[in-house]
Amino acid sequence: MQYINIVNEGVKQLQPYQAGKPIEELERELGISNIIKLASNENPLGLPESAKQAIQAELNNLTRYPDSNGFYFKQAVAKKFGLAPEQITLGNGSNDLLELIAHTFASEGDEIMFSQYAFIVYPLVTQAINAKKIEIPAKNYGADLNSFLNAISDKTKLIYIANPNNPTGTFLSTAEIAEFLNKVPHHIIVVLDEAYTEFTLPEERVDAFQLLAKHPNLVVCRTLSKAYGLAGLRIGYAVSSTEIADLFNRVRQPFNCNSLALAAATAVINDEEFIAKVAENNLQGLKQLENFFISKGLKYIASKGNFVLLDLQQPALPIYDALLRKGVIVRPVGGYGLPNHLRISIGLPEENQRFIQALSEVLDI
C-alpha cells in the first residue's frame, strides 16, 4: 500500500528537515578523527558550570514527571525581564514553539508569511498544516517589511520574522520592528523569532518584550540552545499576552520540557558571566573570519548571529565535501535557495583558524 496517499494533504510535499552533519557520522563515513563542527550554530564554550551543577542535583528525581508548568524557570524568566509568569509558554526548544503557534492560529487555506532566506522551519510548518505560504522576496538578504505590509490580505493569519535571521545573519532595528508592528492589523499574529538575540550588541538589541504592551498580537520566541549552551536539552520559551499564552497552553503537549532541561535553564538564565564570555568569543570570532574573507577577496554577508554566510560565487557542495575530508563540518544552505553559499558557525579561535586553513587549501588561496 502507498501510505502517502492517505496522509494529510500538506504532508505529501514535505521533505525531512536536514540538520547539520554530526561529528560521529563523519567519523563513520570517512574514518577520520580530530573533527571540528561549525555547522549548527552551537555554543563552542561547552555546557556552563551552573547548568552542570543543576543537572547533577536533578538526577535523583528522574523517576518523576517534570513540572509541566515549569514554575521555577518561568519565575526566573519573569523576574529577569519584568514579565508575568502567565505570559510565558515553554517549548522543547523554540522550534517546538514555532510549530505550536502555527497549529494554534492557522489552518488549511490560511496564509502564513515569511521572508525569502528565512528559517526553513517556517515553510515546513506552513506546508504541514496545508496553509498557504507567502514568501516575500528578500531585500539585501533580509526581511523587506514594507513588502510584507503590501502582501497582507484578508487570509493572512500569521507572520514569522527572525531577528537576527538564520541563515543570513541580517538584522532589523528596534525602530523598524516598531514601525512595522504599528501598521500590522491586530488580528494578525506576528512572531518575532529571537533565537540569536544574545549575540547582538546590547546597544542595538531590540527590546521586544517592551513592545508587547502596545502590540497584543506580538509573540516573542527565544531559545537556550544557542548562547546558553543547552542545545542537547531542547528548551525555549515564548512571551506573549496572557490571553495568547492561555491559547498556546491548550495546544501545548504536557511535559514538553524535561526535568534536566528545566533545571539547567533555571540556572543559566541568570548566568551573566557565562553569557558575557559567549558574546565576546562570538564577537572576536566574527572579526577573525571577516578579516580573513576580506584579505582574500571573498564575499560574505555581515552577520549579527553566531555564524556567517559565505558567498563562494560557485556551487558550494564540492567545497563543502572537500572541507569534510579535512575534518571540518560547515553547513551548505542550498535548501534555502542559496546553492553558492556556506554557513559557518563561530567556534573557538583555534577552530576558526582550522576552518581558515582548510578553506585556504581547498580554494588554493
Image: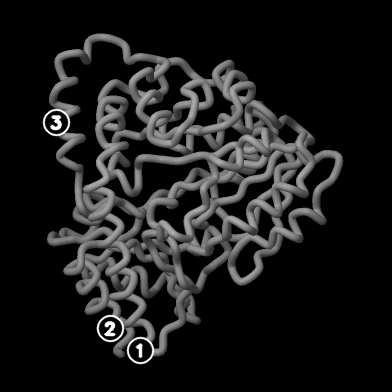
Q: In which quadrant will I find the C terminus?
A: bottom left
Res. 221 in view = yes
Q: Earlier in the sequence, mark 3 or mark 1?
A: 3
> Which of the 4 quarters of the picture holds residue 126?
top right
Q: Is residue 111 above or below residue 242?
A: below
Please, what is the three-letter code of the amino acid marked with disc 2? Ser
Res. 12 in view = no
Please, what is the three-letter code of the amino acid marked with disc 1? Lys
Residue 45, percent from left and from top: 20, 53
Q: Please say if the residues under marks 2 and 1 sit with CB atoms less than 8 Å apart.
A: yes
Image position of 129 (left or right of 121): right
Q: Kindly report the distance in space between the C-alpha atoms of the residues bearing marks 2 and 3.
A: 41 Å
Taking depth in this image into account, of 359 and 255 the one nearest to the observer is 255
Q: Residues within 10 Å of mark 3 (few under 14, many from 20)?
A: few
Secondary structure found at label 2: helix
Taking depth in this image into account, of 291 and 136 the one nearest to the observer is 291
Residue at the farthest top position? 64
Image position of 244 (left or right of 85): right
- Which mark is drawn over residue 296? 1
Q: Earlier in the sequence, mark 2 or mark 1?
A: 1
Q: Mark 3 = which residue?
A: 53
Q: Is residue 256 above or below residue 158?
A: above
Residue 5, percent from left and from top: 66, 31
Q: Residues within 10 Å of mark 1 (few under 14, many from 20)?
A: few
x 18%, y 28%: residue: 54
Q: Nearer the viewer, mark 2 or mark 3?
A: 3
Q: Mark 2 = which residue?
A: 360
Please, what is the three-letter code of the amino acid marked with disc 3? Gln
Q: Nearer the viewer, mark 3 or mark 1?
A: 3
